[in-house]
């Protein structure tokens, strides 16, 4: 797999298939990127299990926080890694050793570990590195184009609002 460029079909298939996401490095701090991504994925209907040992047993956005992957109620469809590249490599190795294999391991923006990706793919796990599922979902659904961002998709059709959480501005609600 060429991890320098992913086809839209590859990313779209992953985002369509995945239902449960374990987010390693989830933060309760509402200005952290992991908080934004967790909130967005929840709004799109994904079941997200935040993982943060320092917050274990508490809640983030109404979701119970787990200390580790071993504490999850089931094997997630996707593991989203909000940790540095070195830590991501160890996480991939731990996942493979556990035998509880997800369909996908997704490494966030700036996170890349090519050797770990090869080991995961050899174990039958699809990999995405240096990408954000929130950005990719928004780009592929056309939502990101509402803000005037080049989504690499040209269309004369006006975007249609779909069910779910959608808005064109920042929320004024500071509670969650």
Image (cartoon, rainbow, N blue to C red):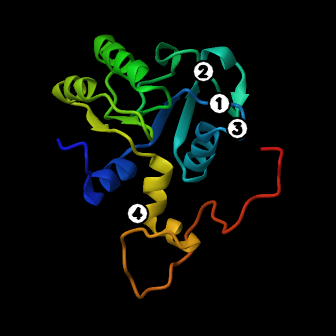
| Label 2 sits on residue | 52
- Could you tell which of marks 1 and 3 lies nearer the N-terminus? 1
Marks 1 and 2 sit apart, C-alpha to C-alpha, by 7 Å
Q: How many marks?
A: 4
Q: Position of residue 143 (x, y in %)?
A: 52, 67
| Label 4 sits on residue | 140
- Could you tell which of marks 4 and 1 lies nearer the N-terminus? 1
| Pair 1/3: label in front | 1
User: Outermost residue, bottom direction?
Assistant: 156
Binning the other alpha carbons within 10 Å of mark 2 as few (below 14), some (14 to 19) or many (20 upward) gives many
In the displayed structure, would residue 35 be above or below residue 59? below
Horizontal relation, residue 8 to residue 148: left or right = left
| Label 3 sits on residue | 61
Binning the other alpha carbons within 10 Å of mark 1 as few (below 14), some (14 to 19) or many (20 upward) gives many
Binning the other alpha carbons within 10 Å of mark 4 as few (below 14), some (14 to 19) or many (20 upward) gives some
Which residue is rendered at x = 71% and y = 35% of the image? 62
Pointer 1 with pointer 2, Cβ within 8 A: yes
Q: Where residue 27 is drawn, which disc sits there?
A: 1
Marks 3 and 2 sit apart, C-alpha to C-alpha, by 14 Å
């Amino acid at each position: 797999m060429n991890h320098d460029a992913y086809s839209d079909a590859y990313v779209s298939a992953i985002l369509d298939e995945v239902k449960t996401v374990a987010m390693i490095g989830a933060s309760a701090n509402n200005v952290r990127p992991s908080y934004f991504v967790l909130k967005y994925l929840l709004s799109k209907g994904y079941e997200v299990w935040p993982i943060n040992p320092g917050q274990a047993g508490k809640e983030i956005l109404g979701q119970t926080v787990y200390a580790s992957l071993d504490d999850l109620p089931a094997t997630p469809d996707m593991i989203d890694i909000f940790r540095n590249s070195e830590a991501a490599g160890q996480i991939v190795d731990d996942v493979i050793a556990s035998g509880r294999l997800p369909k996908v391991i997704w490494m966030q923006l700036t996170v890349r570990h090519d050797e770990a990706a090869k080991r995961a793919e050899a174990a039958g796990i699809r990999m995405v590195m240096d990408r954000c599922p929130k950005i990719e979902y928004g780009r592929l659904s056309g939502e990101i184009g509402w803000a005037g961002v080049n989504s690499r998709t040209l269309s004369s059709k006006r975007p249609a609002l779909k069910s779910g959480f959608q808005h064109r501005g920042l929320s004024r609600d500071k509670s969650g």
